[in-house]
């Protein structure tokens, strides 16, 4: 069930800024400890993402930092905000942080987010993510997540049927599906 109207639109700009700062600060803090993609992962994904993106991506194993947004959302009464600290992975622009194992399906999902960051820019990505959550009332309802899950499922079903994730992202952006 979506949150009450008064908890939606007016909160998007301030929560968007808080989310963008969380992403930017953690990216800067953690990038020095990260490494490039493993060659095996890169080979699996090279038919889906452009080489520039695959070269820039960094990965690291570590706990997912708890977003400050979480405490603020609790104050606002959004008690069912997804607890990101238990997620399978999180992506800060081009940096993927994962607490346990990184499956190729999860990595694919996170790289869809990298392509979304590339297309939208950090600030706009953060704003659309927050707006998607506030409007849909659930993590699964966020359009940026819906696309990442859809493309991940398509990849898992047919890992040899390559397609361009960047083209899919451009298509969604042009048709304002975020
Ligand atoms: Zn995701």
Image (cartoon, rainbow, N blue to C red):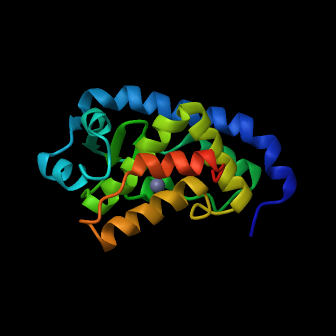
Looking at the picture, tell me which residue is in the foreground, 72 or 2: 2
Height in image: 78 above or below 36? Answer: below
Q: Which residue is at a point 66% across and 49% down the rendered structure image?
A: 176
Height in image: 86 above or below 76? Answer: below
* Image position, residue 141 (x, y; %): 62, 63
Looking at the picture, tell me which residue is in the foreground, 173 or 140: 173
The quarter of the displayed image where residue 72 is located:
top right
Q: Which residue is at a point 79% across and 50% down the rendered structure image?
A: 8
Q: Which residue is at a point 61% across and 57% down the rendered structure image?
A: 142
Residue at the far bottom: name it.
157
* Image position, residue 106 (x, y; %): 33, 59
Using the rendered image of the protein, determine whether residue 64 is visible from the camera's viewpoint. Answer: no
Height in image: 92 above or below 158? Answer: above
Using the rendered image of the protein, determine whether residue 19 is visible from the camera's viewpoint. Answer: yes
* Image position, residue 124 (x, y; %): 61, 35
Horizontally, residue 85 falls left or right of residue 158, namely right
Residue at the far left: name it.
39
Height in image: 3 above or below 72? Answer: below
Q: Which residue is at a point 19% across and 52% down the rendered structure image?
A: 41
Looking at the figure, which quarter contains the N terminus? Answer: bottom right
């Amino acid at each position: 069930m979506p949150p009450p109207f008064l908890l939606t639109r007016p909160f998007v700009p301030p929560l968007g800024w808080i989310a963008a700062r969380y992403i930017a600060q953690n990216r800067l803090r953690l990038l020095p400890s990260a490494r490039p993609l493993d060659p095996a992962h890169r080979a699996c994904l090279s038919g889906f993402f452009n080489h520039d993106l695959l070269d820039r991506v960094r990965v690291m194993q570590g706990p997912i930092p708890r977003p400050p947004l979480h405490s603020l959302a609790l104050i606002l009464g959004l008690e069912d905000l997804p607890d990101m600290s238990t997620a399978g992975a999180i992506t800060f622009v081009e940096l993927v942080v994962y607490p346990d194992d990184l499956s190729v399906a999860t990595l694919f999902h996170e790289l869809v987010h990298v392509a979304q960051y590339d297309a939208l820019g950090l600030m706009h990505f953060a704003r659309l993510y927050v707006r998607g959550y506030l409007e849909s009332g659930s993590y699964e309802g966020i359009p940026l997540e819906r696309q990442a899950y859809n493309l991940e499922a398509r990849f898992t079903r047919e890992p040899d049927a390559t397609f361009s994730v960047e083209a899919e992202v451009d298509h969604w952006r042009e048709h304002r599906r975020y």
